[in-house]
Amino acid sequence: MSPTRDVVGTSDLDIFADTLAGGAGGRRPADRPDRLPVATSPLALRIRRAYEETRIAAGRGAREPLAARGGPLPEPLPYQGETVIDYLDQLTVDWSDFERAGEITRDVVHRLADDKETLRALVYGVEDKPELLAMCERHQLLDYIVLYDALDRGVRLRLHISTEDHFDRPHDHRFSFSSRIVTGGYTHTWYHMDGDLYAGGPDPQARQYLSRHNPDPRAEGLLDRLTPHIVRREEPGSCYTLHHSAIHTTFTTPDTVSLFLRGPVEKDRSVIMDKAEGTLWWRFGRENEPEQRREQKAMGLDAYRQIRERLEKLGVI
């Protein structure tokens, strides 16, 4: 098992790690079909097909269906022939099973990124859905458009668009999610924190410290307990799933766009850290934020249309 999966999540790179680990241990792929992850991304399916072909060539393929042992899923997949939107309308994701949730959601964002017509329809549909437009937000490092919302079924789909600002700000999230890079890219660092920021449970005082201009004074020295764990480059086609407990940072290039499929909230707040300043502050859900904060980050129709035009120029939709 790849160490990245145990600590923070799962990605297509984990599949390669498993494959390489088997080769380094002197095992032929056909010897260990049970090691194969059950991810359904195109990359995972290609690797599993190679495993199956090797296994059959070795004369071991007739005894047991490989799918029952973690091999290729039956093809066509259950929802082939339906649109991605049709599939989303019937999808429920149980994020308490993190591995399985990652497999399902990575498959969705892979397919949607390759389906420009459906992605365009979702982006344009926001203008006619006030409930979605009201959730679209602008931040210093990125803007995001909410394309689909069904958190009661464990699904909220967003499109993230980087701004011109790029800072190294380690942070976590209140929820787990899967992300797929559509265009651009970033240096992605996953961190280890010595200790648990949330060990004390809810922290009412944290609501006072919601901005880099007003950081939490109680956090002095806390960033000294933060160390890089993995650094990798995310390019178009990169896809990963991150657990809400993971701390990471994304140092983006201009015009980076990614599909982001998140699950329900799993803790009351998230943290943002400024390594250069040695400070941190907190983020809460909109229902727990001051009205001024909600107004500052609201996107609005005009900004949404400008971002939509930018997405068209980038060839995303």
Image: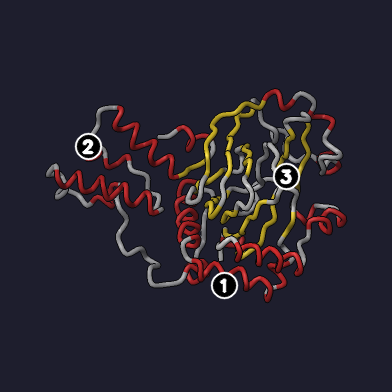
| Residue 50 as seen in the image, left or right of residue 143 | left
Q: Residue 269: which disc?
A: 3
Say which residue label 1 marks: 121
Q: Which tag is nearer the camera, tag 3 or tag 1?
A: 1
- Of residue 11 and residue 34, the one placed in the foreground of this image is 11
Residue under the point 24% across and 50% down: 66
Toward which corner of the image does residue 263 lie, by quadrant?
A: bottom right
Rendered location of residue 282, percent (x, y): 77, 41
Q: Is residue 68 above or below residue 58?
A: below
Q: Is residue 89 above or below residue 190?
A: below
Residue under the point 83% across and 56% down: 296
Q: Which tag is nearer the camera, tag 2 or tag 3?
A: 2
For residue 148, say whether it is visible.
Answer: no
- Which kind of residue does numbered mark 3 sit on? Arg
Residue under the point 63% across and 37% down: 247
Say which residue label 2 marks: 31
Label 3, label 1: how many angstroms apart (C-alpha)?
33 Å
- Which kind of residue does numbered mark 1 sit on? Ala
| Residue 45 as seen in the image, left or right of residue 94 | left
Label 3: state its secondary structure. strand
Which is more N-terminal, label 1 or label 2?
A: 2
Quarter of the image with the N terminus in it: top left
Label 2 crowd (10 A; few <14 / some 14-19 / many >=20): some
Label 2: state its secondary structure. helix
Which is more N-terminal, label 1 or label 3?
A: 1
Rendered location of residue 208, percent (x, y): 86, 42
Q: Are marks 2 and 1 in contact (CB under 8 Å)?
A: no
Which is more N-terminal, label 3 or label 2?
A: 2
Label 2, label 3: how many angstroms apart (C-alpha)?
45 Å
Q: Which tag is nearer the camera, tag 2 or tag 1?
A: 1
Label 2, label 1: how many angstroms apart (C-alpha)?
45 Å
In the picture as drawn, the residue positioned furthest to the left comes out as: 59
